[in-house]
Structure formats: C-alpha cells, structure tokens
Amino acid sequence: QVQLVESGGGLVQAGGSLRLSCTPSGRTDAMAWFRQAPGKEREFVATIGRNGGSTSYADSVKGRFTISRDNAKNMVYLQMNSLKPEDTAVYYCAASIGRFMSRDSRQYEYWGQGTQVTVPS
C-alpha cells in the first residue's frame, strides 16, 4: 500500500505560479496529476515515467505546467505557471506500481487526498 501526500496548493492571482508537491510513502512507477473542478469530472493534467525522462501533458496546460520527480527524495512536483481562473480545481497526485505513463485515471492504484488551487477571475 502506498500513501500519497500532496502539498503546495493555495490561492494565487491570474498569471501567478504555484508548485505542488507529492510525497509517496514507497516506491512508485508512473505518476500523474489529475484535477477536478466543481461540477466537473476529474481530468488528466500531466504524467511522468519512473525515471522522469518521459512526460505527457493535457493540451490545456502544455507550455505552462511542468511535471518532474526527484527519486532520491521520493518527490513528484507540478510547477504551474501563468495560472488562469480555469485552472481552479482540486489537484490530485496519483501513482502506479508496475505500469507505464497513462492519461487514464483507471491505471493508477493510489491517490492522494487532493490539494485546492484557486485562481480568482
């Protein structure tokens, strides 16, 4: 069983930046960030392979968000720049064991509790 703890959410003005962090309690393979806005389904944001060499992003965040990981520190990050009001959501860290990167939330067995990001309009 792997537990994930997210941190770094908050309120930021449009155009600002935030960095989310995720700490898995054990070894993981592919990891990802998803988000869920009020009244909407959970959506894919970004994913990263085990070694950090491969990444993939949703079109809505490409060029603004960067996912990275530091396996020595057992941390995964989501650097979010040029934030927009439509980025407002609860952001979830997700982890898989023995699987490759995926945009499909069903491929991730472990989930964090979520951290709120609010960008006022």
Image (cartoon, rainbow, N blue to C red):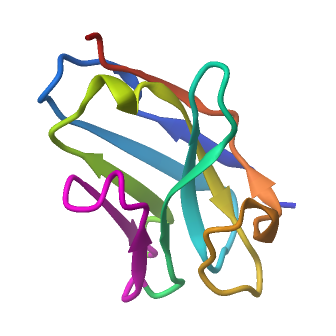
View extreme (right): residue: 1
Residue 60 position, x and y percent, is: 35, 52
Task: Indicate the quadrant where residue 83 lies.
Answer: top left
Q: Quadrant of the C terminus?
A: top left
Task: Indicate the quadrant where residue 117 lies.
Answer: top left
Residue 78 position, x and y percent, is: 36, 52
Viewer-nearest residue: 119 or 77: 119
Magenta segment: does it hold 57?
yes
Q: Residue at x 78, y 57 (%)?
A: 110
Q: Which residue is drawn at 46% across and 75% down?
A: 71
> Is residue 105 shown left or right of residue 120?
right
Residue 111 position, x and y percent, is: 73, 49
Q: In which quarter of the image is the N terminus?
A: bottom right
Viewer-nearest residue: 57 or 24: 57
Residue 46 position, x and y percent, is: 46, 62
Magenta residues? 52-71
Viewer-nearest residue: 104 or 71: 104
Instruction: State whether residue 69 is above or below residue 64.
Output: below
Q: Which residue is drawn at 38% across and 32% down?
A: 87
Numbered-mark total:
0
Instruction: State whether residue 96 is above or below residue 3.
Output: below
Q: Residue at x 68, y 64 (%)?
A: 95
Magenta segment: does it hold 104?
no
Task: Indicate the quadrant where residue 63 lies.
Answer: bottom left
Instruction: State whether residue 12 is above or below residue 57.
Output: above
> Is residue 121 shown left or right of residue 115?
left
